[in-house]
Image (cartoon, helix red, strand yellow):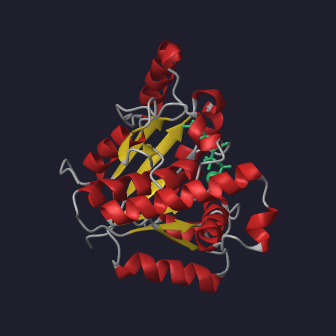
Amino acid sequence: MKQKVIGIMGQKGGAGKSTLTNIIPNEILFKYSKRKKDCKILVLDVDTQRSNSDLRERDVDILKMEIPSPFYDGLDKDDQEQVRLMRTKFQFLNAKYGWKPYELKTVEMEPNSINRGIEILNSDGYDFVFLDFPGTLDQEGTGDLIEYVQYMFIPTAKNTYDINSLTRFIEQINDIKWERLESIVFFFNKFEKIKDRQYNKVQTEIVQRFGYPFMRNRINKTSIVESDYYNSLLPMSLNINLNTQEVYPLAGVNFSQFTDELLEIVNHNNKA
Ligand SMILES: Nc1ncnc2c1ncn2[C@@H]1O[C@H](COP(=O)(O)OP(=O)(O)OP(=O)(O)O)[C@@H](O)[C@H]1O
Ligand SMILES: [Mg+2]
């Protein structure tokens, strides 16, 4: 199998699993697009909260929306502006780099849908498949899909960090009969440089207690993910200036650097 199955998973309570399962695939794809290399990525949304499925549905509606139309005309000025901006940026990246975002499929927690998910995982049709799991692994049905994870990335947000729920999670994964698992790595999300020492302390504690390594790159806390602009269609690390036709990294946002390290891990040190 060439396909790599990645799970950004772990503790419940908003550590950023769904957010990063949306962001990282587009960051990978953008790296490949820039180099004119093909890459196919699928996000399988296994979480009944449907965070990423709902986001993608909204985004597809935005791309398909007719302007003008009764629906568009009914939006307030800010939303109209946001819709036009996203569409224009999408078209711009598509024309310049042949840009396409990741594919998304939703897995419902019923046998037929789970079986379809498993078929996809067995079909080896993608370069990368990302699975978005709920915060607990007890959800009926997720068990069959978890076994496919090869690379597990565990986000830890210091403010929601809870050693008890983490301990439970680690116990749960230790009980799973892994056939394909290659690595388990922790990382910090919502990192704030001024609290560096507190992060280092938590990192030492987790490494000592569970023995799993941390990623060098810590994902900065950023307002982009809470903004109206947040979407599933575009690389979130980019600033796209439509006037000057320039594309450059958004200051303070380090999704791209993090993605390089993630690719090093899953490609065993071969860069994309
Ligand atoms: N790097 C970041 N900077 C700022 N806010 C972030 C960052 N990553 C995630 N968030 C915010 O944290 C909140 C929780 O994120 P998310 O829904 O991705 O967590 P989750 O781990 O999927 O939670 P759940 O266990 O409920 O599925 C969201 O409001 C999201 O916008
Ligand atoms: Mg989630």
> Does residue 149 appear anywhere in the picture?
no
Q: Residue furthest bottom?
A: 112
Up the image or down, 158 lies above or below 126; here it is above
Identify the residue shown where x is 59% and y is 49%: 230
Identify the residue shown where x is 44% and y is 22%: 204
Up the image or down, 119 lies above or below 220; here it is below
Q: Is residue 255 left or right of residue 106?
A: left
Which of these two is toward me, 187 or 219? 219
Res 227 → quadrant = top right
- Residue 1 percent coordinates (x, y): 27, 73
Quadrant of the displayed image that contains ligand 1: top right
Q: Is residue 23 left or right of residue 71?
A: left
Res 91 → quadrant = bottom left
Which of these two is toward me, 207 or 247? 247
- Residue 122 percent coordinates (x, y): 39, 79
Which of these two is toward me, 103 or 177? 103
- Residue 4 percent coordinates (x, y): 33, 64
Q: Is residue 74 left or right of residue 52?
A: right
- Image quadrant holding the C terminus, namely bottom left
> Does residue 169 appear anywhere in the picture?
yes
- Residue 191 percent coordinates (x, y): 51, 27
Identify the residue shown where x is 45% and y is 66%: 102
Q: Is residue 79 left or right of residue 169?
A: right
Identify the residue shown where x is 48% and y is 19%: 193
